[in-house]
Image (cartoon, helix red, strand yellow):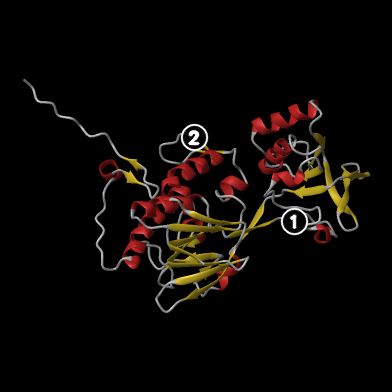
Amino acid sequence: MIKTDILIIGAGPTGLFTVFEAGLLKLTCHLIDALPQPGGQLAELYPKKPIYDIPGFPEVLAGELVDNLMKQIEPFQPGFTLGERAETIEKQEDGSFIVTSTSGLKHQAKVVAIAGGLGSFEPRKPLIPNIQQFEDKGVAYFIRNPEVFRNKKVVIAGGGDSALDWSIFLSEVASEVTLVHRRNEFRGALDSVEKVQELKKLGKITLITPAEVVGLRGNDHLDAVLFQKADKTEELLETDYFIPLFGLSPKLGPIADWGLEIEKNAIKVDNTLDYQTNIPGIYAIGDVNTYPGKLKLILCGFHEATLMCQSAYQRIHPDKRYVMKYTTVGGVHGFDGSKKEAPKAVVKSID
């Protein structure tokens, strides 16, 4: 059983920033996310795409923003349950909640903050008739441990940042990397496209475009993919692994059955004072919520997280009164003993 003050469902930018705001209030946090790493869409779908509307950053790469958020919350030592969905929730007699994740791991907290972005993400699977037969037997939709592909033949399908970035990374791990895309043009960051082209010239990546994987072959494990070219000719390519990276499909998943008020695949919040749902103690912040005037922007999620934490503090410590202090005045005191504060002015006497 993992126990914490605030259980955050979703480790995207809003969920990560919640850890910082809660830390300033001396509240501990644990995060659950279905993806294998923190960052949500920013890390999984477009880590190298620039974002232009984060205050103080005229331009910041999505992956860089995630790295900065992780560094910012490091002093508050959050816990993570990654690669698992939040499945069920049970309210206890003391008012706390127990949330059980996919593996059966239980998490107990007095406050639950749903910051799941557009919901839990499920991979968009290509329409290949027998693909389910090879799932976990050579077909992978996520790359959780790159060492699995050490000295193996790998075929990646897709034309976005994930397909490009993993092709580049695995070119130094796998014995062979083949990237198949249905178009000649790629949708990823320019530097990634150029890097793939460079690795192609060096013989480290094989590019097959325009083409699509239309069939899989093998017995107990995948041993070949069948791809079709633009002229409808087909070829068989031996491989150990097939990794289709066509993005993720957002769904509320099991959260939709928790008794929360849902409107158009989003969670309604009762007010914009604290973003609490119709169930006291459960909050919804970021893109997962809806209310009049809602804007699905990262900076709005940061704002919602800040107000939510103030309300969470009162719920967790009803007998205490919190007096807000600006970080420029009070500094930041991490749970790990670290301390950040502005240098104190030294007044010297004048002779």
Q: Position of residue 314 (x, y in %)?
A: 31, 65
The single residue placed furthest to the left in the displayed view is: 351
Question: Is the residue 349 above or below the residue 327 in the image?
Answer: above
Circle 1 sits on which residue?
A: 125
Circle 2 sits on which residue?
A: 59
Mark 2 Cα shell of 10 Å, populated few (<14), some (14-19), many (≥20):
some
Q: Position of residue 50 (x, y in %)?
A: 55, 37
- In the rendered image, which quarter is residue 105 located in? bottom right
Q: Which residue is drawn at 35% across and 55% down?
A: 26
Residue 291 visible here: no
Frontmost residue, 221 versus 210:
221
Image side of residue 110 versus residue 235, left or right: left
The single residue placed furthest to the top in the displayed view is: 351
Q: Residue at x 86, y 53 (%)?
A: 222
Frontmost residue, 196 versus 146:
146
Q: Kindly state the secondary structure of the residue where label 2 is placed.
A: loop
Image side of residue 148 versus residue 332, left or right: right
Quadrant containing the C terminus is top left
Residue 28 visible here: yes
Q: Earlier in the sequence, mark 2 or mark 1?
A: 2
- In the rendered image, which quarter is residue 229 located in? top right
Q: Where is residue 272 in the image (x, y as percent from the top left)?
A: 37, 61
Question: Is the residue 19 above or below the residue 54 in the image?
Answer: below
The amino acid pointed to by label 2 is Glu
Alpha-carbon distance for marks 2 and 1? 33 Å
